[in-house]
Image: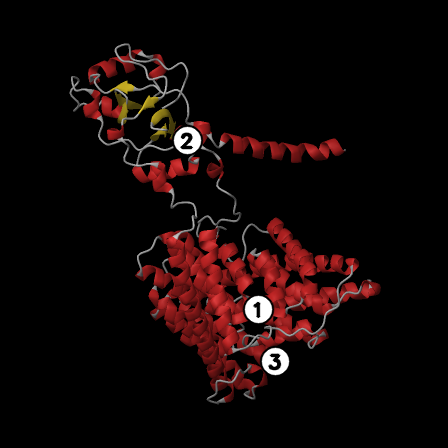
Amino acid sequence: MVHDEGDASPPEAAAARGPVPIAPSMEPVLALEHLASRGGAIGRRTVAITAAASAIGVAAAAIAVVLVACLALVTNLAFYGEWSLAPASPAGNQLGGWVVVVPVAGALLVGLMARYGTKAIRGHGIPEAMEQVLFNESRIPARVLFMKPLSAVVSIGTGGPFGAEGPIIATGGALGSLVGQFVKITADERKILLASGAAAGMSATFGSPVAAVLLAVELLLFEYRASSLIPVAFAASAAAAVRIAVVGTAPAFSVGVLAQPAASAIVAYVAVGAVIGVLAVIVTKAVYAVEDAFARLPIHWMWWPALGAVVVGVIGYFAPRTMGVGYDNIEGMVSGGLTGTALYTLCALKLVSWLFSLGSGTSGGTLAPLFTVGGGAGAAVASLLALAAPGAGIDPRLGALVGMAAMFAGASRAPLASVVFAFETTRQAVGLLPLLGGCCAAYLIACVMAKHSIMTEKIARQGRPVPTEYTADFLTQVLVRDIGCKPVTTLPAEQTVAEARRWLAESGAAQHHNGFPVVAGDALIGVVTRRELFASSRDPLDPIARVVSRPPVVIGPEASARAAADLMLRESVGRLPVVAGGRLVGVVTRSDLLQAHSRRLASEHHVRRVRKIGPRRAT
């Protein structure tokens, strides 16, 4: 209904221009208090979800420990023929030419698991988890909880050039989702548990709880509010505590002592980040180009991982360090133990190996390969800048650290998680400013050059929208009193349907109104619509009170427009009487909610005009 000062009233009925009191016996069925649980309010529900998330964090950390042990076992068996849980790298194998066979055999097993188990194990896991959050109410099939880590152990343990963190994150997310499906919670709460499990997996792998929380916010939650942040933080903290109990407190990557960079060096590290941002876009496009090439092959996708593994094996024969997780390679870059031609060759070959393996659809993570490629490229760019400006104090080790973080920031569009991750895994406080500048530079370049990230491109190709910016809901900033407290035309309950129809036909001011509050004396008894009044089955002699089909659904003037929109949707109504102090003071409609956005659109239009006119004024 349009609220207009010129609204005409039925000549046979009294016009309710002023506030209409509501009799105590006629109170509406819903009031503003029923909306108190919405909007991220903290209460017993949040405490219960936090407790569940903490338990999931402990369980996800235990899964991470078991998975890493199984990975070591498979690596020792495949490359050394030993039954051992000791950490091992394929780099020291003595298999000769037979090394090519090992990753191919593992890839064949993964292909069989994907075809006869579940296709959800293909890929590195984070895009798949994002897709479940966005489009499937965070429901991940139970079999993924078992098949994903098993396939990752086989794939990486037989030389796949991946990190273990991706499968661990995906497995933790599957655990959280599964718990959320077995207990009676909302889809929103299930999303929180999924994100909690994923963050716990990352925290348990690297001992980086803060970065894990930020990663969950930037890639899975798509929001920042207390009711979701707190459970995820507790889950990540619990997982980190388990890691400390099992592994200790040492950082994931030992760097040594880094000098505080000067201002000129910080500028250089920002330049490193910008270059890596370009490389991140190239790498992202290359991943999907290889994936498209495999999709054009005239064979079933089950065989693709084996074909990709041939490339992995051949490269592994010449450069064994490209196989496996390669965390030791990352540590060598940032500590200065791996430099020069050996570093650059390793990174280039690792990139090619990873592109073909990931593009073939096998199971594995992206973080470690991206860190390896980014670290090598960052060290190379920093070394060149150090030669060009020898007095700037540019350290290739810090360049490698900035490069690896900037690569992930540009490829995944998670800049804050990237900065904090590099700090937490090295404990190098002097790197925070270079990391911030470098990661933001990479993020800027990547956003300008490409619309989608390595995490969202897969979803976008399915024609599905993916959130890229997390802004406050504008309707939460608009109050009902600003859009709904206007003069209201009401219909008396004792008036007949025929009289109301005649008035509606004769009154030009009421032609575009679709609903009217109905009052009986001082009481609001409901709302009737034009369709209800003109229904052919309605007796014209019936009083309007008989047309009212349900008690009124009302809202208070201090409620937000978002609360009004949610209440309309929940109760399937198109308008809400606005009640203050037991009196009817207005009506808010769906048209009012749409019109409330005019201020936001005007503000955005003004910003665009300023940006457009600014350069012309400057000239």
Q: How many marks?
A: 3
Asked whether disc 3 touches disc 1, contact meaning CB atoms under 8 Å apart, the reply is no
Q: Position of residue 471 (x, y in %)?
A: 52, 44
Q: Would you name the residue on which mark 1 appears?
A: 369
Furthest-top residue in this view: 11
Q: Would you name the residue on which mark 3 appears?
A: 318
User: Is residue 360 at least partly visible in the picture?
Assistant: no
Category of crowding for the residue at label 3, using alpha-carbon neighbours closer than 10 angstroms: few (below 14), some (14–19), many (at least 20): few
CA separation, marks 3 and 1?
18 Å
CA separation, marks 2 and 3?
72 Å
Quadrant showing the N terminus: top left
Vertical relation: 45 (above or below) 377: above
Q: Position of residue 405 (x, y in %)?
A: 62, 63
Q: Which mark is residue 240?
A: none
Mark 2 or mark 1: which comes first in sequence? Answer: 1
Q: Residue 426 sits in which quadrant?
A: bottom right
Q: In the rendered structure, which amino acid carries the disc numbered 2?
A: Pro
**Left or right: 476, with 25 as reference point:** right
Secondary structure beneath disc 2? loop
Q: In the rendered structure, which amino acid carries the disc numbered 3?
A: Phe
Q: Which mark is residue 557?
A: 2
Q: In the rendered structure, which amino acid carries the disc numbered 1?
A: Pro
Category of crowding for the residue at label 1, using alpha-carbon neighbours closer than 10 angstroms: few (below 14), some (14–19), many (at least 20): many
Secondary structure beneath disc 3? helix
